[in-house]
């Protein structure tokens, strides 16, 4: 498919990690409410935002993702009590590091989204796609060793 | 988080006084403890709310700051660690720094001097009343 | 290599209108591992499931990918379907092409493309799926309740009434807890012992309840359904079966008259003998000897109680005894006490005997209390005319040094109660209450408080007290603020009552550690979910009842006790517990033994053991993580914390998620 | 140094320990290397001077498994690493005898080379007790450098002169810190994203994946590195290789975040001179700013910031763009 | 035992009694007060703004001097005690103040709160011990009922001064017992005398001191002791009907130790 589309306008590739209990359900609600967002977003279901290993995020970027978003239960609402608190620290540090090495801000995002927030989920994804669209293709994060 | 101008001013007072007026829960223990209560036009517990509202002018013009004994009773007993006495000190600083409105002028001193007056009194009055 | 079947659902037109279902089938057919791909109108229907079962049999499928609605909708259905055909249910993955694709996209080409990618990710994942077995663990049909106050009593009674055996462990010589010290209860003003004592008797007589009083939990091991608990029965020095509870020993103990042993139950307002029951209605009605103070134990001389006991029940040689019992569930109902007031010197609690705490006031008003229910000053035994109540002493403080950050919740109501009770008995008393806020959420609560003001004319003043000054004439000068009227108040009082903050029983920290139940900064036990699982600890099989979980009044405690009992009954009703197979697993060869994972596990499911491992022919003893599968809930926090990648999560393994990422980014 | 040698010999002789980990003379006066000493005569080669920068704590992971106690010489900053290893249950404290050795800053021969000193025959003034300049006897004659000018960068941000864990201390230490620990990090933070990217690109592209940083790092003590196991492979090793190649230093820095004591060994051993500590120090700075000051290894009981949280923690979105305000 | 001694301005002048009796008592108790050379006034008040540096420097210099001598620093005046302890706490715990103060002072080695500041009473309690002090008393003050007047600056802020329980102190009462007299406990003992407002509102301080005398004598005190020259001044100025004599605590100490005359 990709062959004949190369010259078309840039469409970002976005990976979304959603926790099973809140944000994945929020995404389902967005779906059943027909609140659309771009097809660029592909969701991976994880049990908890605390399950998201920074390796997964870096892996996605290295494989060509242009943006990665992690969605979890609101702080205080984690199905497993505390998973999102650890995720929050982990992601804060990772994002700050990515900024530090010169990656554009905004390619990564964390959003807390409950099972009832279908509208918020859709709005978040629309915003995020727009942001990535404006940043363009991810070049810097493809190779952090920066050899190429 | 972006701040309003008022919040920025309060932040500066927080910095200067080492005390956070937002922590005040209006229990009044400071006012209950204050030995100089009767002398003060703005009461100790009101310092926090005046600052939060941004009524700096009124604070600066009040007599209260000069009536506080700096006895630390409110600082010691405040359950919220607001330490109103420090806000009072900050007010004195605001006055001194903003307009040099010192409460004590050097030329007043000779008339006030008593023979057995200890140096400690003069020194501390100068510090408290003046920049 | 897996043999995967892919089934793409039309969901009527729900999917098919936006996703070219046929094209999806064509495009995924040649994905690695896929041996069969087909579509159908309604995959979840009877006929759709039949189609799946047939394909599994015909193509010997080892894995399934269903491209349909959300797994939250039908994952269970398709897993059951796979199981019907003899396939492990955990070999099924669902690609969500409805909620997360067809319903939100309009462009058919785009939606089809995305559906294919989602299918590919699911296929890649199934390639790495392994069959998982739900574990089973048996359930011991007996519950332990730690703490014999109203919370523990109610929980135990409810469990016992449902037909299960319950043991109560209480560290004091009698059950009854704080409530037994109270005089009356709000908002109805019924007498506390009138409603509590019958329950205490019921506990004692219930065939399903065993009481361990004067006992403590010593050690806990095991996990939900299978706890082993060591209980230390402290030596009572009185033979339980022989004692008739006649009380002769207590009346004759020489220390009762001349000794200076403050009664714990009466909060030191009265002394007690060395052999004692905390109070007259104690359950069990068997005294204990306080060995630290007993003359016989100190000097070897005396022995009056032994000589006088008509049933020869005194045994000075008795030793502590440890019993080990198995339980399926444990309820923590360790209750509360009030804080130490040493840090509040400004209220002169330590200087003046006429400054008392609310619990002391309860004792002073109680007909069975040290003054026989007559309210008097401890200094001169005169009846106080002017009484000042100070609220929030040690509650709502900012720093740990000062007090507690939380609202103790019960003080506003019991102070209104105290005020009204005093006015009922001695109407000419002047009562002033200094408060910061009066908090009365609860049924009939605000009405109760208003009654104190409107009918009893209790003087409520908004403002805290700065200092209580004992005066040369024996009165107390209360220096306070009236914030609403803008006044500093200096008033004389005969008695000052402090509403001291509540805090969890100090022993709870040790117990929580033994149970691996988490505890917050204030030593309150944490619930598994603040809203949805309020009576369960995050540690499976541990339940919470009463003040141990947070400040609450008696009605709330009783309802929470009942709720905890229901959860226990629900657990004990099962013969076996199914365990979630999507649990963490530790690769012992990779584990560093660093404990990082155990630090983030919310369920205490990870322990560390020294085990023998063979690593490249080398036999070594290593400290490695072990996951207790009965406790693990599969959140995966450990996997992200593990630096070496030794910890992995079944069903959501590192490789599975990585491969999904790869498939999406391909 | 003689006092240290005497004491070590004594410990061996009286059976307190059965071996010692210290430094032995290298082929040049500026490259001593870590070594085991088991007999009195081994000490003929023992050296402890300004060039003994190596952090020996990591060696204790294996050494403490051996029969009998091992004495290890640790400088003040090394003891932080050792403490961190205790926290992670990686060393057996019981089997370790810690000699806290004095330190007045460790030296970097590259500094001399950069100052144009070549053809070194011998070096004087690097003894642990002295406090004068360093004198190089070179084939071009005698050259002098101030001790501080020759110090490793990491010693300019010294953690202090105190050993945080030891059985005994021999020799005096000096706090050689005279620079702000985060000065370099702040400098980078102040660049534009493009400049930052260019900077790291030029640095990281030098990496030859020799693994020296990983091997020397006391926090990188996994039995098997995640890059060497197959836990994150999706299909085959080839894929992983490229991932590993590209992301190695970021992932490594993240893995040691909250555990790295900032001992600076990674940068010291890098044959390409990549300032790898800049990654670790960025994490440390962020942790300090976001969650309160934390020094790994200071208190073996303290909870690591990544396995801890507060309800009011900073949101990830507020962790970035801080420089823009 | 040698201590660095910071007398402060008032003790060199109006409160010479406080100073001289302390010196003679110290000799009798076997420790030495070595006056810091060229000390400067502490300012009498801890700086009002936490961002002020200059006003803290005289204290920092005195503290650093004691550190260089390897001695603890003793004060007698309650104001000096208050200021020195608070500045020392800043130097120990507030990085910004520490850095800036050190930048000004340029000591050989930066000062970061190493010196231990002790009030003379703390030395009696924690080093000598009140039981040991009692043994050295030659003229026990038997039959005297003495009220300790603490005031504010010796006690508060309690956390930083770490002198005694600020609401319910007992160090001076224990001291009185050690001298053989009976302490009188009354609640005004830690309430402010009016302090420096005596300069402009002498009537107010008179109200305060009257309350102090009323309360203490109500409980039976026949005299008061204090450690503060300013309290002493205000109490002496009182025209309360209940007024009783006020002494510096060191004067009674010297008397009990039998060294008052030679002082």
Image (tube, rainbow, N blue to C red):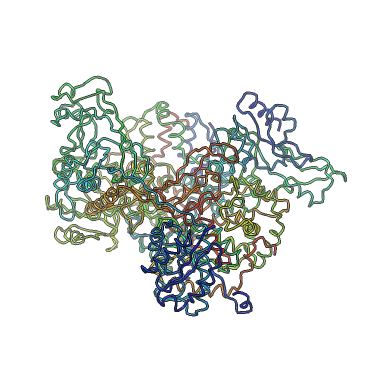
Could you say where residue C431 lies in the image, as x and y percent from the top left? 19, 54
Res D127 → quadrant: top right
Residue sticking out furthest to the right: D140
Q: In this view of the protein, can residue B110 be seen by the observer?
A: no
Q: In this view of the protein, can residue D211 be seen by the observer?
A: yes
Could you say where residue D4 lies in the image, as x and y percent from the top left? 67, 31
Res A14 → quadrant: bottom right
> Viewer-proximal residue, A60 or C202?
A60
Residue sticking out furthest to the top: C301
> Viewer-proximal residue, E24 or C600?
C600
> Viewer-proximal residue, A73 or E110?
A73
Could you say where residue C538 lies in the image, as x and y percent from the top left? 37, 51
E133 vs C546: above or below: above
Could you say where residue A55 lies in the image, as x and y percent from the top left? 56, 58
Say whether residue C622 is left or right of residue D266.
left
Res C334 → quadrant: top left
Say whether residue D173 is left or right of residue D288.
right
Say whether residue C494 is left or right of residue D215.
left
């Amino acid at each position: 498919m990709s062959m004949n589309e190369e010259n078309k306008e840039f469409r970002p590739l976005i990976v979304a990690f959603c926790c099973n209990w809140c944000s994945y359900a929020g995404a389902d609600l967005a779906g059943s409410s027909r609140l659309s967002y771009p097809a660029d977003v592909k969701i991976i279901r994880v049990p908890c935002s605390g399950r998201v290993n920074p390796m997964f995020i870096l892996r996605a970027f290295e494989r060509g993702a242009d943006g990665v978003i992690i969605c979890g239960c609101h702080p205080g609402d984690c199905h497993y009590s505390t998973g999102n608190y650890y995720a929050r620290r982990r992601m804060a540090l990772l994002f700050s590091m990515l900024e530090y090495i010169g990656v554009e801000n905004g390619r990564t995002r964390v959003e807390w989204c409950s099972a009832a927030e279908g509208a918020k989920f859709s709005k978040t994804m629309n915003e995020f796609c727009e942001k990535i669209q404006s940043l363009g293709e991810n070049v810097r994060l493809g190779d952090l060793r920066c050899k190429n | 988080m972006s701040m309003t101008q008022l919040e920025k001013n309060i932040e500066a007072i927080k910095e200067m006084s080492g005390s956070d007026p937002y922590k005040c829960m209006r229990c009044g223990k400071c006012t209950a403890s204050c030995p100089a209560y009767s002398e003060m036009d703005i009461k100790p517990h009101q310092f926090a709310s005046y600052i939060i509202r941004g009524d700096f002018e009124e604070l600066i013009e009040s007599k209260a700051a000069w009536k506080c004994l700096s006895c630390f009773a409110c600082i010691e007993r405040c359950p919220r660690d607001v330490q109103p006495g420090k806000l009072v000190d900050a007010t004195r600083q605001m006055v001194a720094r903003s307009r040099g409105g010192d409460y004590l002028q050097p030329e007043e001193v000779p008339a006030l001097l008593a023979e057995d007056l200890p140096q400690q009194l003069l020194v501390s009055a100068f510090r408290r009343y003046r920049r | 290599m897996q043999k995967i079947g892919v089934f793409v659902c039309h969901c009527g037109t729900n999917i098919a209108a936006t996703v070219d279902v046929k094209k999806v089938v064509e495009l995924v057919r040649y994905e690695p591992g896929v041996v069969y791909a087909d579509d159908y109108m309604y995959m979840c229907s009877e006929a759709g499931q039949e189609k799946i079962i047939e394909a599994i049999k015909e193509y010997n499928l080892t894995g399934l990918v269903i491209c349909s609605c959300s797994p939250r909708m039908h994952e269970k259905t398709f897993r059951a379907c796979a199981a019907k055909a003899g396939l492990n249910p955990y070999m099924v993955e669902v690609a969500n092409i409805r909620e997360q694709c067809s319903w939100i996209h309009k462009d058919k080409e785009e939606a089809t493309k995305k559906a294919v990618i989602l299918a590919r990710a699911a296929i890649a994942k199934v390639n790495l799926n392994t069959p998982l077995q739900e574990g089973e663990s048996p359930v011991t049909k007996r519950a332990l309740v730690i703490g014999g106050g109203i919370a523990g009593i109610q929980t135990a009674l409810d469990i016992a009434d449902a037909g299960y055996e319950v043991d109560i462990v209480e560290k004091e010589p009698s059950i009854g807890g704080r409530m037994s010290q109270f005089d009356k209860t709000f908002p109805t003003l019924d007498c506390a012992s009138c409603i509590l004592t019958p329950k205490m008797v019921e506990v004692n007589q219930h065939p399903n309840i065993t009481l361990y009083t004067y006992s403590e939990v010593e050690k806990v091991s095991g996990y939900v359904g299978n706890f082993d608990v060591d209980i230390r029965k402290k030596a009572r020095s009185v033979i339980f079966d022989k004692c008739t509870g006649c009380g002769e020993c207590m009346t004759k103990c020489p220390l009762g008259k001349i000794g200076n042993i403050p009664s714990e139950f009466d909060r030191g307002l009265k002394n007690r003998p060395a052999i004692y029951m905390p109070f007259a209605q104690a359950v069990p009605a068997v005294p204990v000897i306080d060995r630290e103070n007993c003359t016989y134990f100190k000097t070897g001389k005396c022995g009056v109680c032994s000589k006088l006991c008509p049933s020869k029940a005194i045994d000075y040689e008795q030793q502590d005894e440890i019993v080990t019992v198995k339980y399926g569930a444990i309820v923590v109902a360790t209750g509360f006490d009030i804080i130490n007031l040493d840090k509040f010197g400004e209220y002169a609690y330590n200087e003046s005997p006429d400054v008392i705490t609310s619990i002391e006031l309860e004792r002073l008003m109680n007909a069975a209390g040290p003054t026989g229910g007559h309210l008097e000053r401890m200094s001169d035994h005169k009846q106080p005319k002017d009484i000042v109540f100070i609220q929030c002493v040690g509650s709502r403080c900012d720093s740990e040094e000062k007090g507690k950050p939380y609202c103790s919740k019960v003080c506003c109501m019991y102070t209104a109660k105290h005020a009204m009770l005093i006015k009922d008995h001695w109407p000419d008393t002047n009562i002033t209450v200094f408060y910061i806020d009066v908090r009365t959420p609860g049924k009939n609560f605000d009405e109760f408080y208003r009654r104190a003001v409107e009918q009893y004319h209790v003087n409520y003043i908004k403002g805290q007290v700065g200092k209580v000054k004992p005066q040369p004439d024996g009165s107390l000068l209360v220096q306070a603020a009236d914030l609403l009227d803008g006044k500093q108040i200096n008033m004389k009082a005969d008695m000052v009552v402090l509403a001291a903050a509540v805090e969890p029983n100090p022993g709870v920290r040790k117990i929580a550690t033994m149970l691996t139940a988490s505890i917050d900064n204030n030593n309150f036990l944490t619930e598994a979910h603040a809203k949805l699982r309020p009576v369960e600890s995050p540690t499976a099989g541990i339940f919470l009842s009463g003040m141990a979980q947070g400040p609450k009044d008696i009605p709330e405690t009783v309802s929470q006790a009942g709720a905890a009992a229901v959860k226990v009954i629900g657990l004990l009703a099962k013969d076996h517990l199914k365990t979630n197979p999507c649990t963490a697993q530790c690769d012992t060869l990779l584990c560093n033994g660093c404990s990082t994972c155990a630090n983030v596990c919310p369920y205490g499911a990870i322990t560390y053991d020294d085990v023998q491992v063979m690593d490249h022919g080398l036999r070594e003893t290593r400290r490695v993580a072990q996951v207790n599968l009965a406790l693990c809930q599969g959140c995966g926090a450990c996997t992200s914390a593990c630096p070496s990648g030794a910890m992995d999560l079944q069903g959501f393994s590192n490789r599975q998620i990585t491969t999904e990422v790869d498939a999406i980014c391909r | 140094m003689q006092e240290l040698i005497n004491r070590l010999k004594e410990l061996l002789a009286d059976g307190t320990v059965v071996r010692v980990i210290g430094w032995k003379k290298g082929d040049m006066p500026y490259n001593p290397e870590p070594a085991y000493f088991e007999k009195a005569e081994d000490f003929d080669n023992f050296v402890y001077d300004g060039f003994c920068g190596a952090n020996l704590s990591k060696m204790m992971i294996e050494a403490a498994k051996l029969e009998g106690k091992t004495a290890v010489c640790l400088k003040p900053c090394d003891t932080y690493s050792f403490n961190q290893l205790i926290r992670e249950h990686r060393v057996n404290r019981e089997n370790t005898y810690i000699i806290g050795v004095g330190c007045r800053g460790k030296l970097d021969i590259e500094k001399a080379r950069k100052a144009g000193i070549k053809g070194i025959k011998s070096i004087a003034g690097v003894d642990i007790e002295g406090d004068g300049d360093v004198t190089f006897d070179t084939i071009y004659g005698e050259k002098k450098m101030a001790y501080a000018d020759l110090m490793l960068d990491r010693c300019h941000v010294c953690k202090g002169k105190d050993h945080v864990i030891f059985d005994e201390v021999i020799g005096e230490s000096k706090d050689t810190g005279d620079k702000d620990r985060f000065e370099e990090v702040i400098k980078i933070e102040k660049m534009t994203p493009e400049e930052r990217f260019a900077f790291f690109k030029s640095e990281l592209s030098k990496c030859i994946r020799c693994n020296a940083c990983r091997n020397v790092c006391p926090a990188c003590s996994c039995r098997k590195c995640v890059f060497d196991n197959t836990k994150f492979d999706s299909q085959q090793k080839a894929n992983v290789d490229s991932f590993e190649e590209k992301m190695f230093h970021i992932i490594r820095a993240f893995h040691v975040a909250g555990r790295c004591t900032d001992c600076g060994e990674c940068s010291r051993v890098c044959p390409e001179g990549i300032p790898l500590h800049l990654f670790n120090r960025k994490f440390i700075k962020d942790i300090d700013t976001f969650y309160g000051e934390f020094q790994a290894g200071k208190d073996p009981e303290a909870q690591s910031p990544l396995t801890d949280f507060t309800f009011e923690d900073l949101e990830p979105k507020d962790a970035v763009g801080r420089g823009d305000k | 035992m040698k201590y660095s001694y910071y007398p402060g301005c008032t003790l060199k002048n109006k409160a010479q009694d406080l100073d001289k009796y302390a010196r003679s008592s110290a000799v009798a108790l076997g420790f030495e007060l070595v006056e810091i050379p060229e000390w400067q006034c502490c300012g009498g008040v801890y700086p009002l703004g936490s961002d002020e540096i200059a006003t803290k420097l005289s204290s920092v210099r005195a503290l650093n001097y004691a550190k260089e001598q390897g001695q603890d620093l003793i004060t007698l005046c309650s104001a000096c005690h208050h200021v020195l302890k608070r500045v020392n706490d800043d130097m120990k715990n507030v990085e910004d103040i520490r850095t800036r103060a050190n930048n000004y002072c340029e000591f050989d080695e930066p000062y970061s709160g190493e010196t231990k500041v002790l009030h003379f009473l703390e030395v009696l309690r924690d080093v000598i011990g009140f039981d040991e002090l009692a043994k050295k008393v030659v003229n026990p003050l038997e039959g005297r009922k003495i009220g300790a007047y603490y005031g504010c600056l010796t006690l508060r802020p309690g956390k930083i001064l770490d002198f005694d329980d600020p609401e319910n102190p007992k160090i001076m009462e224990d001291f009185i017992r050690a001298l053989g007299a009976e302490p009188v406990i009354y609640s005004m003992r830690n309430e402010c005398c009016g302090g420096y407002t005596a300069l402009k509102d002498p009537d107010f301080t008179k109200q305060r001191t009257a309350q102090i005398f009323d309360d203490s004598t109500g409980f039976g005190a026949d005299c008061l002791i204090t450690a503060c020259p300013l309290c002493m001044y205000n109490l002496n100025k009182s025209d309360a009907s209940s007024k009783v004599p006020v002494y510096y605590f060191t004067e009674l100490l010297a008397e009990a130790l039998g060294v008052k005359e030679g002082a």
